[in-house]
Each structure stands twice: as C-alpha cells, then as structure tokens.
Image: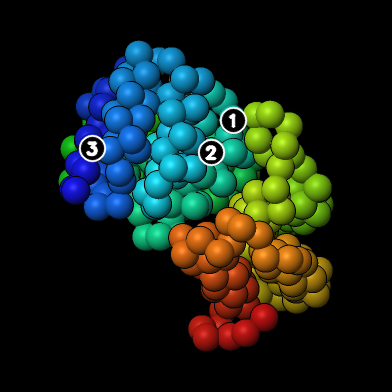
C-alpha cells in the first residue's frame, strides 16, 4: 500500500515553519506503521514532541520506512537534542531521502553544536535557492532565518588561527563521540556512536577544505587516523540480529561508503580508497 504523508504538517506545527511543504511517500509501511506515523504527525503539530518522537521511533522499529529519520530528526531538533537529530537525518540521507525543511533544521542543529563549517554550507544551499522553489517550500520566515544564520556564521570569523582551533577541537570531538551516549535514555549503540563521530568527521573535512593548500598537509595524518577509526567503528564486531535485516545491512554498507567519499573529498581525489 502506498503511504503518502505530508511532512508539511510537521512544519506547520511551529510559526517558524508554518508555510513549509514537504511530501514523503513509502510503499513499505504496514497498517500499524501508518497509524503510528499519522499519530506522530498529529502529536508534532500539537507540539507534543516527546510523544511524537516515541511514535516515530515505534514506526522505525516496526517497519522498513527508510525516510523515518527525517521525521525523527525534525522532532529531535524541536526537543533541542541536536546531536541525535543529526544522526537521524543521516540515517534517512543514506537511503537518498532529503527535503528542504529538514535541511534547514539540520543546518540549525549544526549551528547549535558549533559545526559552523557544515552549517555554513547548508544555509548557503538554502540561500542559493531563495528565489526559486526552495523559497516557496521554506516560506519567508525560514528564508529570513537562513540568511540571518549565514550572517552570524560570517561574523564568527574564519581566520587561519580560528580554523585551526576549530579543527583541533573537532578532531577531539570525534574521539569523544565514539564513547558518548546519544539516546534520551542514556543507552547507546556502536552504530549510534559511529554515526555521531561521522557528523564531526564531516565537520573536520569541511574545516580542512577551508584551509589554504599549504596549511592542509600537517593535518592530514591525524585526520586520516580519525577516518580509519570511525570507519572501523561502523563495522559490527559480531553480527547482530538487526544486522541480518536487509535495511540494517544496507545502512552499514552506506555508512562505510560515505566515510570513503568523505575521505576522497578531504584529499580532493575521486575514487580513492582509505
């Protein structure tokens, strides 16, 4: 059965996103998942975000709805759980699901966490589309918000000393993330820790690319070490019941592949191997 859910209903839940329109569909949701998803949307619209998150996670565990990370990510963002939000968005991105409103929330979460290089790129992509269809999706408030966040990032500065300090701090955050809990209950999994580390790994990559060519070389050995450690963390030490699931297995493969792509981007070499 085809499930078509207007995620704009989620965006309409808050004044900042009341004109946003995002459409999502899936052929994989069963009746139970459809019911929970629609209930989650209603809870989100009523600003009952904790309830909405529980419902979306119920959908996540009960079906192969690969875009559920977008719903979870927007809800986690509203709860101020920005690290978890980024991990949820990434899960949906691995299966090719993206939308404009979720990108805005992702950018804000990056900004709140101090991932200014990534936030700059994400807000820049929204700003570039402000005169076209993206503007119609975002609505005037989010368009204004994207511009204001971009201005705040520019004011934060990007001197060589500032970039080096941010890169140093980011490399430290990668290691810390592999030991960090990322769930509301205080529990964590190896996959969640690796995903969070990947968020910071992407920030480190973007910071490196902002440096002049002659300043990049000293950072590459440490950065490569981080890449190797994070990629190893994405591979389960022992196969779990979840990893036998086709969706979980695909996620693991996509996770490893995206780390390879990030490394190639860092060294500006397409088709490289880590």
Marks 1/3: CA–CA distance: 24 Å
In the rendered view, would you say 210 is above or below 49? below
In the rendered view, would you say 109 is above or below 236? above
Tag in front: 1 or 3:
3
Q: Where in the figure is residue 187, as x and y percent of width and height?
A: 72, 37
Q: Is residue 205 left or right of residue 171?
A: left
Query: Under tag 1, what secondary structure?
Result: loop
Point out the tag, 1 or 3, that comes first from the N-terminus. Answer: 3
Marks 2/1: CA–CA distance: 6 Å
| Residue at 67 percent of width and 81 percent of height | 274
Q: Where in the figure is residue 157, as x and y percent of width and height?
A: 62, 44
Q: Where in the figure is residue 95, as x and y percent of width and height?
A: 40, 60
Mark 1 packing: few (<14 Cα in 10 Å), some, or many (20+)? some
Tag in front: 3 or 2:
3
Total of numbered circles in the picture?
3
Residue hosting label 1: 81
Display coloring:
rainbow
| Residue at 54 percent of width and 51 percent of height | 118
Residue hosting label 2: 85
Mark 2 packing: few (<14 Cα in 10 Å), some, or many (20+)? many
Residue 252 is labelled as none
Mark 3 packing: few (<14 Cα in 10 Å), some, or many (20+)? some
In the rendered view, would you say 30 is above or below 269? above
Query: Under tag 2, what secondary structure?
Result: helix
Residue hosting label 3: 5
In the rendered view, would you say 252 is above or below 134? below
Query: Under tag 3, what secondary structure?
Result: strand
| Residue at 35 percent of width and 54 percent of height | 97
């Amino acid at each position: 059965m085809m499930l078509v859910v207007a995620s704009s209903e989620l965006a309409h839940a808050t004044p900042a996103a009341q004109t946003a329109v995002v459409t999502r569909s899936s052929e994989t949701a069963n009746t139970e998942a459809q019911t929970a998803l629609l209930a989650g949307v209603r809870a989100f619209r009523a600003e009952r975000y904790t309830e909405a998150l529980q419902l979306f996670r119920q959908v996540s565990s009960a079906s192969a709805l690969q875009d559920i990370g977008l719903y979870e990510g927007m809800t986690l963002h509203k709860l101020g759980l920005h690290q978890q939000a980024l991990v949820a968005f990434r899960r949906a991105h691995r299966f090719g699901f993206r939308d404009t409103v979720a990108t805005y929330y992702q950018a804000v979460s990056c900004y709140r966490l101090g991932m200014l290089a990534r936030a700059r790129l994400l807000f820049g992509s929204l700003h570039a589309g402000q005169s076209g269809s993206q503007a119609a999706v975002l609505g005037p408030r989010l368009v204004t918000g994207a511009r204001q966040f971009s201005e705040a990032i520019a004011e934060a500065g990007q001197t060589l000393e500032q970039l080096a300090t941010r890169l140093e701090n980011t490399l430290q955050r990668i290691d810390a993330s592999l030991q960090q809990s990322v769930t509301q209950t205080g529990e964590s999994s190896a996959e969640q820790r690796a995903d969070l580390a990947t968020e910071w790994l992407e920030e480190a990559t973007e910071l490196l690319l902002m440096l002049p060519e002659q300043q990049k070389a000293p950072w590459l050995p440490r950065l490569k070490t981080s890449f190797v450690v994070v990629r190893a963390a994405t591979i389960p030490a022992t196969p779990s019941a979840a990893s036998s699931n086709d969706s979980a297995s695909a996620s693991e493969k996509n996770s490893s592949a995206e780390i390879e792509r990030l490394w190639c981007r860092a060294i500006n070499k397409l088709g490289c191997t880590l």
